[in-house]
Image (cartoon, grey):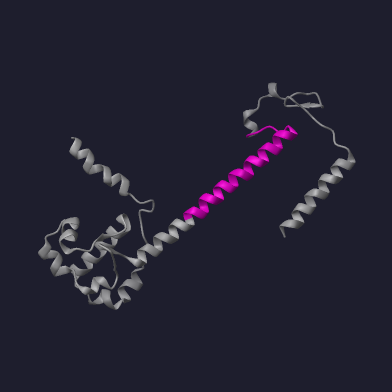
């Protein structure tokens, strides 16, 4: 059982955050190297592409690659030709797909921008909530409030004492708001 756990652990660690990659059929079919491949070569090519997407690379050594893919070395030697290498790049002891690496880079950059945008949105939301709390505006949807929580006293609303603002204070606030809006553009 311990051996089984050791075997399964790398599968969890190797899972990538993006489970799919784009494959543009029209571009692939129009590609001269793809058209020159036999069906066996095409099958090996797409298998290597999928392995590169999930695991980043495959071994460049034919013996290791055949073990890695679970096929006989003779079968690999029959199917692996220089044509597949036109889609791959040897880096050290590995074969990588430059095209897939570009796709992965784009996905990760877009995901990072989304993450940062989410953090920024959360900060803005928190700042709005804090400003609302200072003014005594209750948080959350109104469905959370019942009639016992609302006071009929005009100076007290929802347990907070309302502050009356002078015309001068209101004019200053409006001026600051308009200046802030103008600064955005």
The residue nearer to you, when weighing 65 against 139, is 65
Image location (x, y in percent) of residue 58: 25, 60
**Residue 114 percent across, percent down from the top left:** 52, 52
Q: Position of residue 62 (x, y in %)?
A: 17, 64
Q: Nearer the viewer, residue 164 or 74?
A: 74
The residue positioned 32% from the left and 76% from the top of the image is 30
- Residue 114 against residue 169 in the figure, above or below: below
Start and end of the magenta stretch?
111-140
Query: Residue 84 appears in which quarter of the rendering?
Result: bottom left
Query: Picture quarter containing residue 47?
Result: bottom left
**Quadrant of the drawing holding the C terminus:** bottom right
Based on the picture, tell me whether residue 118 belongs to the magenta stretch: yes
Is 113 magenta? The answer is yes
Residue at 31% from the left image edge and 49% from the top image edge: 14
Q: How many marks?
A: 0
Q: Nearer the viewer, residue 173 or 146?
A: 173
In the image, what residue occupies the spot 69% across and 23% down?
149
**Residue placed furthest toward the right:** 167
Q: Left or right of 2: which side holds 122? A: right
Which residue, as the protein is rendered here, is positioned at the far top? 148
Residue 60 located left or right of residue 116: left
Q: 155 or 175: which is nearer to us?
A: 175
Q: Main secondary structure of the magenta part?
A: helix
> Where is residue 133, by image quadrant?
top right
Quadrant placement of the N terminus: top left
| Residue 121 x, y percent position in the rendering | 59, 47
Q: Is residue 152 above or below residue 3?
A: above
Answer with left or right where residue 183 lies relative to residue 13: right
């Amino acid at each position: 059982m311990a051996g089984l756990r050791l075997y399964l652990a790398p599968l969890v660690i190797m899972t990538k955050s993006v489970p799919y990659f784009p494959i543009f059929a029209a571009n692939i079919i129009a590609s001269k190297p793809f058209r020159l491949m036999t069906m066996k070569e095409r099958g090996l090519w797409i298998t290597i592409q999928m392995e590169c997407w999930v695991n980043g690379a495959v071994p460049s050594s034919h013996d290791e690659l055949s073990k890695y893919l679970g096929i006989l070395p003779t079968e690999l030697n029959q199917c692996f030709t220089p044509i597949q290498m036109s889609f791959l790049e040897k880096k050290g002891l590995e074969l990588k797909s430059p095209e897939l690496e570009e796709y992965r880079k784009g996905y990760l950059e877009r995901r990072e921008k989304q993450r940062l945008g989410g953090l920024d949105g959360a900060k803005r939301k928190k700042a709005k909530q804090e400003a609302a709390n200072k003014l005594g505006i209750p948080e959350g949807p109104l469905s959370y409030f019942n009639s016992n929580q609302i006071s009929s006293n005009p100076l007290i609303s929802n347990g907070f004492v309302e502050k009356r603002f002078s015309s001068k204070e209101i004019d200053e606030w409006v001026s600051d708001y308009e200046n802030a809006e103008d600064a955005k553009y």
